[in-house]
Image (tube, helix red, strand yellow):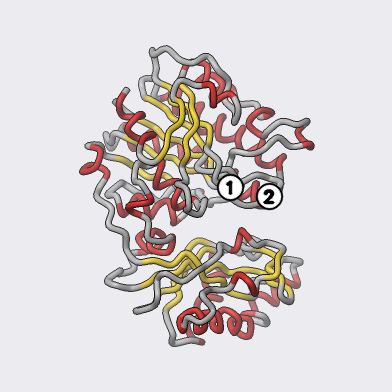
């Protein structure tokens, strides 16, 4: 049996006035997902365990069948795995390039700064401080590596505090020596970045400057056994986002570089579908995990119209091709967590899920945040989704 898991990051939402009191899933034209839902089994999946932050790292770990309560150590190490950074006992932070104005964090992505621009800023930061080493990632998503540090510092994702005064959300606890040193590093980074030529150009072009760093999501290397060892299957991880790709690397999956995959609205979803089909076909792997970031970005930007459009694009360019070109495969679809348009950050509610198995009886329901609660899969959590997927 061959399997696809298609994850629309942050796509689940609340009913919105601008959509006539409906959710983006309820108004989107999604014939392929509707077909899967009418013929498949539906339910809801609690991807974020109680007491854990509703991050994509934790949620996608759950979807892949690794209980984050056992395996999760932080976001930074997952992203570092893609870049081949030696772990040893190093502590690895996610380092966002952000836009601040005064004491307000305006944009967690610095206007979606390009990777080329980010490279210049990362180089300047490395020439500035000997405390640790900055590593270029994808656009605004970069890393900061320390040989030693307290890996239990309190931290806040910058996308949770957009539009807020950032000082109360600096690293903690306040009396911790490492928190004090790294908070000073973050605040002092404005001196390096504020008038850097990259930001001078961006302001001249009417774009937001990347004028501060934000450190968060730190941790050490997690101990994750290979997918083959845990579930007896081989797999591919298809994503533009280093966090997701790193999870694939650490679990022994094939992690290709997909041309045109950007992690934003312009991402080439046709190319992702092509690589997913290649994974189960030419490479004869058992599972292809296809992750799309654009729906999450629309939620963070508070843009319901774009979220609807991205759901429709996933339906057309990924689900349509998988159903047509791999008609005997089992296909699952779900968000990893909600990123509601009206709150513009992640929430921890269970997400709607559908598993379509060709030739098997289904629930005869439509796919949305409410109908899925009536489905025969019921309520899933932790590793139950993966075990359910593989049991049919």
Task: Please name the residue shown 32% across and 22% down the image.
Answer: 392
Q: Position of residue 42 (x, y in %)?
A: 48, 24
Identify the residue under disc 2: 343
Relative to 343, residue 100 above or below: below
Asked whether the beta carbons under mark 2 and mark 1 sit within 8 Å of each other, the answer is yes
Neighbourhood count class around disc 1 (C-alpha, 10 Å): few under 14, some 14–19, many 20 upward: some
In the rendered image, the quadrant that contains the N terminus is top left
Query: Which dot marks residue 224?
Result: none
Look at the image and tell me whether residue 324 can be seen: no
Q: Is residue 301 left or right of residue 119?
A: right
Identify the residue under disc 1: 347
Alpha carbons under labels 2 and 1: distance apart: 9 Å
SS at badge 2: loop
Relative to 206, residue 259 above or below: above
The image quadrant of residue 162 is: bottom right
Q: Position of residue 315 (x, y in %)?
A: 56, 30
Task: Please name the residue shown 75% across and 31% down the image.
Answer: 21
Relative to 270, residue 357 above or below: above
């Amino acid at each position: 049996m061959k399997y696809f898991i298609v994850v629309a990051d942050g796509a689940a939402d609340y009913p919105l006035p601008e959509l006539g009191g409906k959710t983006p899933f309820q108004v989107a034209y999604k014939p392929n997902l509707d077909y899967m839902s009418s013929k498949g089994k539906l339910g809801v999946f609690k991807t974020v365990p109680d007491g854990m932050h509703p991050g994509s790292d934790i949620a996608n770990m759950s979807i892949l069948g690794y209980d984050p309560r056992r395996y999760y150590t932080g976001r930074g190490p997952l992203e570092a795995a893609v870049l081949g950074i030696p772990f040893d006992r190093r502590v690895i932070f996610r380092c966002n390039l952000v836009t601040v104005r005064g004491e307000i964090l305006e944009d967690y992505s610095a206007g979606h700064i390009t990777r080329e621009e980010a490279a210049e800023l990362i180089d300047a930061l490395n020439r500035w401080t000997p405390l640790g080493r900055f590593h270029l990632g994808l656009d605004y998503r970069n890393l900061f590596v320390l040989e030693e540090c307290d890996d239990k510092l309190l931290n806040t994702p910058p996308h949770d505090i957009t539009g807020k005064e950032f000082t109360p959300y600096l690293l903690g606890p306040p009396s911790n020596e490492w928190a004090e040193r790294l908070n000073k590093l973050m605040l002092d980074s404005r001196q390096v970045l504020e008038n850097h030529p990259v930001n001078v150009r961006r302001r001249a072009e009417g774009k937001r400057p990347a004028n501060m760093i934000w450190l968060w999501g730190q941790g050490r290397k997690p101990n994750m056994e290979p997918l083959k060892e845990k579930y007896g299957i081989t797999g591919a991880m298809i994503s533009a986002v280093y966090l997701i790709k790193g999870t694939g690397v650490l679990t022994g999956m094939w992690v290709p570089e997909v041309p045109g995959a950007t992690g934003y609205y312009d991402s080439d979803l046709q190319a992702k579908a092509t690589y997913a089909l290649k994974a189960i076909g030419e490479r004869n792997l058992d599972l292809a995990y296809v992750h799309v970031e654009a729906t999450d970005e629309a939620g963070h930007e508070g843009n319901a119209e774009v979220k609807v459009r991205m759901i429709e694009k996933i339906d057309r360019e990924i689900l349509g091709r998988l159903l047509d070109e791999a008609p005997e495969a089992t296909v699952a679809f779900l968000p990893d967590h909600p990123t509601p348009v009206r709150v513009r950050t992640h929430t921890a509610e269970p997400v709607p899920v559908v598993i379509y198995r060709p030739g098997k009886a289904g629930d005869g329901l439509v796919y949305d945040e409410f109908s899925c609660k009536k489905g025969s899969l019921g309520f899933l959590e932790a590793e139950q989704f993966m075990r359910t997927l593989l049991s049919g």
